């Protein structure tokens, strides 16, 4: 898989966190993820785009307000798996969460996501 294709799928996935309206989240995820995607997140294993959509909406509805999710590194693509760092920051310098995702690709879409979240800390 080419790095540009992987980066595009990852950036489309992350754009769902930053969509201007909740109505766009499903469409963005459908572009980036296989229908049977597996999410290994903080609360365990979930399957399907709907499960990932719930995870994204939970982040979008953070108690401190709608935040911003950005890719904070390049995409390291040693094979069918890729790794990248991300940062989520809430408005007005609220809590910041940073971590790394490891994703696997099938047919140019993400079919597994493993989320490694770091400490929540104030934005600097």
Image (tube, rainbow, N blue to C red):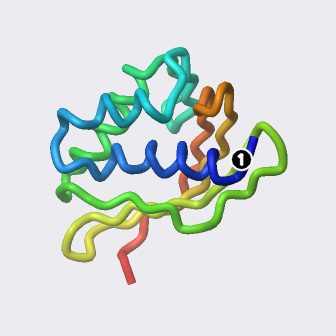
**Based on the displayed image, in which of its 4 quarters is residue 111 positioned?**
top right
Say which residue appears at 66% left-offset and 58% top-offset: 75
Say which residue appears at 59% left-offset and 35% top-offset: 113
Q: Is residue 110 above or below residue 72?
A: above
Q: Is residue 2 above or below residue 22?
A: below
Specify few, some or many for label 1: CA neighbours under 10 Å numbering under 14, 14-19, or 20 or more: many
Please provide percent x and percent y for residue 89: 34, 65
Please provide percent x and percent y for residue 123: 36, 77
Q: Which residue reaches farthest right?
A: 78
Query: In this image, 39 relative to 17: left or right?
Result: right
Looking at the picture, tell me which residue is in the foreground, 93 or 33: 33
Quadrant of the snapshot with the N terminus: top right
Q: Is residue 63 above or below residue 120?
A: above
Query: In this image, 56 relative to 119: left or right?
Result: left
Please provide percent x and percent y for residue 95: 32, 66
Marks counted in the figure total: 1
Say which residue appears at 38% left-offset and 66% top-offset: 96
Q: Which residue is mark 1?
A: 82
Q: Is residue 39 above or below residue 12?
A: above
Query: In this image, 6 relative to 2: left or right?
Result: left
Quadrant of the snapshot with the C terminus: bottom left
Please provide percent x and percent y for residue 4: 64, 53
């Amino acid at each position: 898989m080419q790095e540009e294709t992987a980066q595009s799928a990852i950036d489309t996935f992350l754009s769902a966190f930053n969509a201007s309206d909740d109505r766009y989240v499903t469409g963005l995820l459908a572009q980036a993820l296989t229908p049977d995607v597996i999410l290994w997140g903080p609360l365990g294993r979930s399957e399907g785009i709907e499960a990932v959509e719930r995870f994204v909406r939970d982040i979008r509805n953070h108690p401190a307000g709608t935040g911003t999710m950005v890719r904070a590194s390049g995409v390291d693509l040693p094979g069918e798996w890729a790794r990248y760092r991300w940062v989520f920051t809430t408005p007005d310098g609220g809590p910041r969460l940073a971590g790394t995702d490891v994703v696997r690709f099938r047919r140019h879409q993400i079919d597994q996501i493993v989320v490694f979240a770091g400490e929540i800390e104030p934005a600097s």
